[in-house]
Image: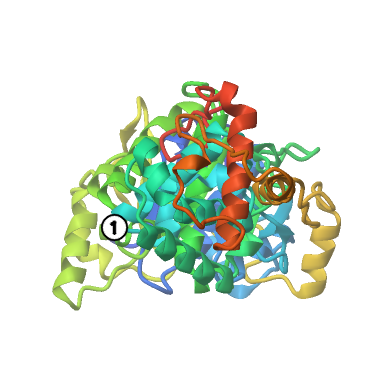
Amino acid sequence: MPQQDGQIFVGASRNPDESINKDEFLTLKFGNRHGLVTGATGTGKTVTLQVLAEGFSKAGVPVFCADIKGDLSGIAVKGEAKDFLLKRAEEIGLSPYEFDQFPVIFWDLYGEKGHRVRATIAEMGPLLLARLMDASEAQEGVLNIAFKIADENGLALLDLKDLQALLNYMGDNASELSSKYGLISKSSVGSIQRAMLVLEQQGAENFFGEPALKISDIMRVSNDGYGQVSVLAADKLMMNPRLYATFLLWLLSELFEELPEVGDPEKPRLVFFFDEAHLLFNDAPKVLIERVEQVVRLIRSKGVGVYFVTQNPLDVPETVLAQLGNRVQHALRAYTPREQKAVQTAASTFRPNPAFDCAEVITTLGTGEALVSMLEGKGAPSIVERTLIRPPAGRIGPLNDTERQAVMHASPVAGIYDQTIDRESAYEILTERARKASEQQSGNAGDGWTLPGFGGDSNKPAGRGRSGYQRETIMEAALKSVARTVATQVGRAIVRGILGSFKR
């Protein structure tokens, strides 16, 4: 039996004469040292991801992964004896080859193939929201000011309409607010609002709101000691790749901010697979890449392992690549200069094996075969080995709709996230206070409302009362009312972490 305590059986390496060399394992105590799974389309990356996820789950480690094509959903049911699976098991000496099923929670931003998963605008923070909107530097600055105003004044930003209400006020009072918070361009505010319309059309309103995902619900362990496997349905989500990447990055930042330090545990507290990882780094601003690198470096001490899955090792910046200790490299093609460079890059990151040329072997690997190097001993990478990846214990391929619904019905979070909660937040607060402020202004036109640090309404141009732009009058009065109410609380603003999420 190849499985050993404290290790995940990955496969068996081969000698140059094709004979079996030895079993290859991922050591659990190095599972939080992160990893990388790369290879061209059709070379077996998804099966490798499933094998690793099953191994972690069986060891009692919760797993979060995205299901790009729907194939990963099969992990929820036992595999079936098929000729090619039995043949691989025999080749690598996997005896007995036992099928198994794993506890799965399905998640879906759209609530169609899994439980709804949401975050609030406030939790997302200005940096990630700017990334989602592909905002310019000036627009990102305006978003930062919006969050600062909301944080200081106790305005809960839960969904897109909350942010829209606040942006309306900022645009209508850009001159006054700029004197306190820095330049607020009406054109930048308008650009952000247009970007929000695009997000709504792309379905982002499904993501923003409550109940927001609790980190504890992706860190469950089942009654039989298996780590819960959270599978995010991402086939539809991938039509909006920026939302996909930003959501996973938000989740990673939430883990970083919320979990306590645990050092290097005997096994990870959670393993996070970031599939299609190139979407995270494509066209990302330098500051975001630097902060991602910082999170990846520091989250290890929280007991979280991050595994990037992508086609090309060049997709991952060198500063991040250097921190990924456990490597599985499937076949790469080398037809173009960039592909040839990728092969050389991949080969150069392994500890060389004198028995073969890495760069040459990478282009000749078969399906389900990979170059494998895992951390061993005191945390040093092992010599790279040409390895046949073991067959998974769960099903290869997707669940049908009936099977998926049965898993969702039996889920430990069934009924918790499926209904949207629209509690009182910035939009409702501003609307109600706008109504009261409007009534008060109608009855006492001489009284004004003030923001902390600003003068009264006496500085406004003549004729800007009820005969002026009505939305400006209402929104201005509303926010000034809010500011007046919580002026004594200014200075107790929310503290935000590396990626702009709440700092716990």
Secondary structure at numbered mark 1: helix
- Residue at the far bottom: name it: 335
Q: Quadrant of the N terminus?
A: top right
Q: Nearer the viewer, residue 142 or 364?
A: 142
**In x, y percent, where is residue 15?**
31, 55
Q: Residue, x 25% and y 43% (percent of image)?
A: 319
- Which scheme is used to colour this image of the protein? rainbow
Answer left or right for 308 relative to 285.
right
Q: Residues within 10 Å of mark 1 (few under 14, many from 20)?
A: many
* Residue 256 higher or lower than 89, as above or below: above
Quadrant in the rendering for residue 254: top right
Which residue is under mark 1?
313
Answer left or right for 421 relative to 382.
right
Q: Name the residue type under label 1.
A: Pro
Q: Nearer the viewer, residue 76 or 110?
A: 110
**In x, y percent, where is residue 134?**
38, 61
**In x, y percent, where is residue 180?**
38, 36
* Residue 305 higher or lower than 97, as above or below: above
Residue 99 visible here: no
Quadrant in the rendering for residue 326: top left
Q: Residue, x 72% and y 70% (percent of image)?
A: 399
**In x, y percent, where is residue 25?**
46, 42
Q: Residue, x 77% and y 74% (percent of image)?
A: 401
